[in-house]
Image: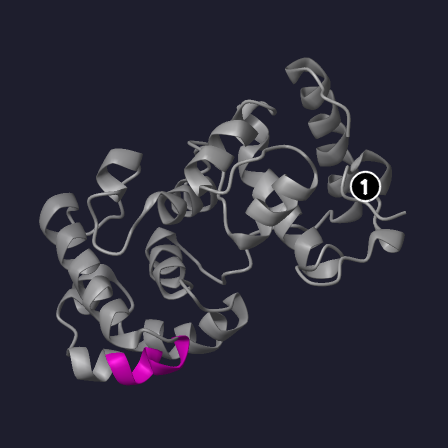
Amino acid sequence: MKRESQAVRRERATQIFDLLQVEYPDARCALEHRDPYELTVATILSAQCTDERVNMVTPELFGRFPDPRSLANADQDELESIIHSTGFFRSKARNLIGMALAVVERHGGRIPETMTDLLKLPGVGRKTANVILGNAFGIAEGVVVDTHVGRLSRRLGLTKESNPEKVERDLKALLPKDRWTLLSHLLIFHGRAVCAARRPRCEACTLSFLCPSSTV
């Protein structure tokens, strides 16, 4: 793609968003949850693990530990046995218990609603905090950048960066705040359905005419 101005890139990003919204009208957070606590736990578990696997584990987990107070008092061995299949289960169990303890001691048992407070919780980085704020509280603090979002953003010429925080910075500059949360879901859905890592199906892609990486 020829060098484009920021204004032209914003227009193209808007077209991409609008087309994906039509293509995936049901795009949403794939982690099953009923409240901010459940989403926080599920997001911590999703590191290096599929959402599908996390959703298989959380019903038992939430049945045993339905709130931060019960999780803060969890036996680590028991917790590890429940979440074992999500990988890195020892560190995840430590983080979950530490997160719950912090929420109980510092926030009265409620998941905090600010980026600053969330980032102080064990196991919570910026991506996790963005997931929680955007999907549990409806607060658009930033754009969630996972492997799908990063890959598609580069293929679509929306960024040249590989660092997630720099990718997020570039995406935030292209679309208004009220679109940041949904943007991630749309790119993730498209990445899973069409724009796969190894063999993107450019011939089936609704964005092919807007994509500098398209093979058609």
Which residue corresponds to the image point at 24% horizontal and 64% vertical from the top-left? 96
In the image as oriented, which residue stretches furthest toward the left? 105
Where is mark 1, residue-wise? 207
Which residue corresponds to the image point at 68% horizontal and 34% vertical from the top-left? 157
Residue 160 lies in the magenta-colored region: no
What element does badge 1 sit on? Answer: loop
Instruction: Please name the amino acid that badge 1 sits on.
Output: Leu
Overall secondary structure of the magenta section:
helix
Q: Observer-nearest residue: 140 or 36?
A: 140
Q: Observer-nearest residue: 130 or 203?
A: 203
Residue 53 seen in the current view = yes
Residue 84 lies in the magenta-colored region: yes
Which residue corresponds to the image point at 65% horizontal and 46% vertical from the top-left? 152
Task: Report the quarter where the N terminus lies.
Answer: top right
What span is in magenta?
80-86
Q: Percent x, y for residue 95?
A: 22, 62
Q: How is the image coloured?
A: one colour
Q: Percent x, y for residue 168?
A: 49, 35
| Quadrant in the picture for residue 44 | bottom left
Q: Observer-nearest residue: 166 or 43?
A: 166
The answer to whether residue 80 is left or right of residue 129 is: left
Which residue corresponds to the image point at 54% horizontal and 38% vertical from the top-left? 181
Q: Percent x, y for residue 188?
A: 62, 52
Q: Percent x, y for residue 174?
A: 60, 24
| Quadrant in the picture for residue 195 | bottom right
The answer to whether residue 35 is left or right of residue 26 is: left
